[in-house]
């Protein structure tokens, strides 16, 4: 069934979520609009660090260079895990929209665990790079690489804390269908860190220098 | 379409303790898929949040998108190992194309830009286009692509 074939639900199908929050003059919720504006500005934030990495990548400087230490199979697995966490995140939103709180708790926890696995992989990767001499202060490629991927990791960590908070609320029965928008906004943030990683994985890891 | 089995939001408002009495365990509400009804409910359009103009995709569609994302990622990694056999320029074009496809799929379907108010899409596209334009200009001026 395509989206075009789906009839628009009646007003009875609209979850009364977030209706405590005042809507903007445009008829959309303030929190959702604020999140989209934040994500829009975060594009410029990450763009700056990706550009800095690209600027220094091909410059003559003491080794080792990023391409000498990358472990593509390992990073591919962690990228795959982060990608799958986006699936579990939307399944969590679908669950709360249906009022299925058991699945909501399962998918929220699964998303946080996938995120934690990604961060664990990043810590392991950083440790390996340090052992091979590719450090934050070794050269400008190292500085820009660690700052870029570290900032992304910080975003993922903040997302994990957010998800675990929602999971805690759901466990206590304080997250109901009326709060669906809270899960959606956390999901927007989570998917954003996923799309940023899609760009980083391609531009920083896969594209030949 | 708007039968009682899909009205998650309205039905659960009567739940006093959703943890102890989750919706999928209440025969009266039947909001969540049970063993026998899972396939049918999984394809039922989800209720909308306030302000949304179209229902979210179904979980089945979410899984289909994930399968496409996995396939594209596998193609990207396969392409990486073709370095040396295929011109670098061609690899870069394909890798960037795959990244754009994945980015668009996640933003459109998982972030619901396809079904939500157009104003959110405009804001996000503005940020993405501004970032790409700004940094492409800066990197070009710094001769990053000329070597």
Image: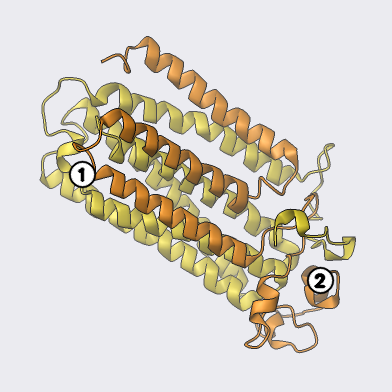
Chain colours: A yellow, B orange
Q: Residue at x 47, y 68 (%)?
A: A110
Quadrant position of the N terminus of chain A in the picture: bottom right
- A136 and A62: which one is in front? A62
Q: Which residue is mark 1?
A: A70
Farthest right residue in view: A11
- Residue depicted at x 72% and y 70%: B44
Compared with A31, A56 (above or below) is above
Quarter residue B60 falls in: bottom right
Q: Chain of mark 1?
A: A
Q: Secondary structure at mark 2?
A: loop
Q: Most extreme residue toward the top, as rendered?
A: B141
Residue B7 bears which disc, if any?
Answer: 2
Q: CA distance from mark 2 to mark 1?
A: 50 Å
Q: Quadrant of the C terminus of chain A?
A: top left
**Residue B126 shown left or right of residue A190 in the figure:** right
Residue A119 visible (yes or no):
no
Mark 2 surroundings: few (<14), some (14-19) or many (≥20) residues within 10 A: many
Image location of residue A167, percent across then percent down: 55, 68
Q: Secondary structure at mark 1?
A: loop
Q: Work out whether A19 lies above or below B76.
A: below
The image position of residue B23, as x and y in percent, is: 71, 81
- Nearer-the-camera pick, B137 or A207: A207
Give coordinates of residue B38: x percent, y percent: 64, 80
Residue drawn at x 35%, y 35% is A203
């Amino acid at each position: 069934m395509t989206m075009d074939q789906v009839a628009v639900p009646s007003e009875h199908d609209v979850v009364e979520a977030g209706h405590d929050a005042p809507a903007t003059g445009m008829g959309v919720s303030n929190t959702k609009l604020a999140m989209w504006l934040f994500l829009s500005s975060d594009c410029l934030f990450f763009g700056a660090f990706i550009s800095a990495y690209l600027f220094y990548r091909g410059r003559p400087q003491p080794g080792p260079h990023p391409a000498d230490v990358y472990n593509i199979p390992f990073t591919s697995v962690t990228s795959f895990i982060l990608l799958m966490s986006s699936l579990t995140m939307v399944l969590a939103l679908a669950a709360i929209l249906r009022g299925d709180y058991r699945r909501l708790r399962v998918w929220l926890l699964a998303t946080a665990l996938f995120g934690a696995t990604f961060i664990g992989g990043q810590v392991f990767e950083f440790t390996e790079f340090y052992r091979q001499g590719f450090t934050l202060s070794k050269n400008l490629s190292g500085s820009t690489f660690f700052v870029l991927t570290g900032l992304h990791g910080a975003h993922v960590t903040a997302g994990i804390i957010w998800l675990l908070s929602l999971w805690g609320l759901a466990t206590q029965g304080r997250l109901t269908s009326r709060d669906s928008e809270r899960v959606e906004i956390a999901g927007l943030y989570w998917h954003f860190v996923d799309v940023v990683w899609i760009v980083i994985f391609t531009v920083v890891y896969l594209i030949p220098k | 379409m708007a039968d009682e089995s899909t009205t998650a939001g309205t039905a659960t408002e009567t739940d006093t303790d959703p943890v102890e009495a989750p919706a999928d365990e209440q025969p009266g509400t039947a909001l969540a898929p049970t063993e026998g009804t899972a396939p049918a409910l999984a394809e039922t359009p989800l209720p909308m949040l306030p302000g949304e103009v179209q229902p979210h995709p179904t979980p089945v569609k979410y899984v289909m998108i994930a399968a496409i994302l996995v396939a594209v990622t596998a193609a990207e990694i396969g392409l990486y190992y073709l370095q040396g056999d295929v011109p670098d320029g061609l690899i870069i074009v394909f890798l960037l194309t795959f990244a754009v496809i994945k980015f668009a799929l996640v933003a459109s379907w998982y972030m619901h830009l396809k079904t939500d108010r157009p104003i959110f899409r405009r804001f996000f596209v503005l940020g993405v286009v501004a970032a790409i334009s700004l940094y492409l200009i800066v990197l070009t001026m710094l001769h990053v692509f000329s070597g």
